[in-house]
Image (cartoon, rainbow, N blue to C red):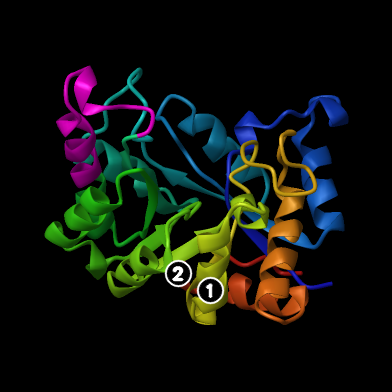
Amino acid sequence: MSLLVDSHCHLDRLDLSPWEGRLEGALAAAAEQGVGYFLCVAIDLEHYPALLAMARRDARIAVSVGVHPNETEGEEPSVDRLLELAADTEVVAIGETGLDYFRSSEAEGGLEWQRERFRRHIAAAKSSGKPLIIHMREASEDTLRILHEEGAETVGGVMHCFVEDWAVAKRALDLNFDISLSGIVTFNSAKALKEVARKLPGERLLVETDSPYLAPVPHRGKPNYPAYVRHVAECIAELRDTRWEAIAETTTANFFRRFSCARPPSY
């Protein structure tokens, strides 16, 4: 069976009730669908130690370090703090970071704090040499502008859960950022995103669940799990007129090339 990588998930936030609260059950269900590696992405620093513990217990799990653009509680990361945490060998990326103007707005007192936080993450990525995981929602112009202004193309990374059109995708690719597609690409309404899935160069494509959020068809509206990245790969394969195994092979190679600190499983 071809190996799939879930390039963006939140294992610490899954609903594990089907497996009596045991993460091992969710990972075993993923393995049955050919999913053999997981990047567990941080959204705050308070939960980071738990993510790190997961990665130390299971060689199939890698982690990132960062603070989500919508997080307003907890520790505000400095560049030095991010670099201190990113020095751990289990950490393969900085983020998720970026801009989100959907949940926060200028009317609430301005969003310069989001932009400054974003710039600090970029600085940490450049200093550490570890790629960025970018969250971008209703903020494509400012996100791409800041990436360019800060020279983020020197380290590159991934536009996670990409939902924009081909024009925005092309600009991100030109800045040395790969495109990661989530379950949203399976939605019937995602016409522009399906076009992106068709047009993307194969070597710049990743797949993810963003679980426990955004479950793909046929599980839309229900809790999401890493096993469901198989549905994402199958949808993209149909759009690109190929086999899902080919998508698995390509996206897995892309993942380990982009996140070069990640250790591929030995099986």
Residue 205: x percent and y percent?
53, 71
Front residue of 128/235: it is 235
Amino acid type indicated by mark 2? Arg
Query: Quarter of the image containing the C terminus?
Result: bottom right
Residue 144 occupies quadrant:
bottom left
Residue 195: x percent and y percent?
53, 70
Q: Which residue is mark 2?
A: 258
Residue 88: x percent and y percent?
42, 48
Find the magenta span and give its range.
102-120
Amino acid type indicated by mark 1? Asn
Mark 1 touching mark 2, by CB under 8 A? yes
Q: Is residue 148 above or below residue 43?
A: below
Residue 220 occupies quadrant:
top right
28 left or right, relative to 164:
right
Front residue of 6/88: it is 6
Q: How many other residues sit within 10 Å of disc 2, few (<14), some (14-19) or many (≥20)?
A: many
Alpha carbon separation for disc pair 1 and 2: 6 Å
State whether the magenta stretch is mostly helix, strand or loop: helix
Q: Is residue 112 within the magenta segment?
A: yes
Front residue of 227/143: it is 143
The mark found on residue 254 in the picture is 1
Residue 261 visible somewhere in the drawing: no
* Element marked by disc 2: helix
4 left or right, relative to 153:
right
Report the number of discs: 2
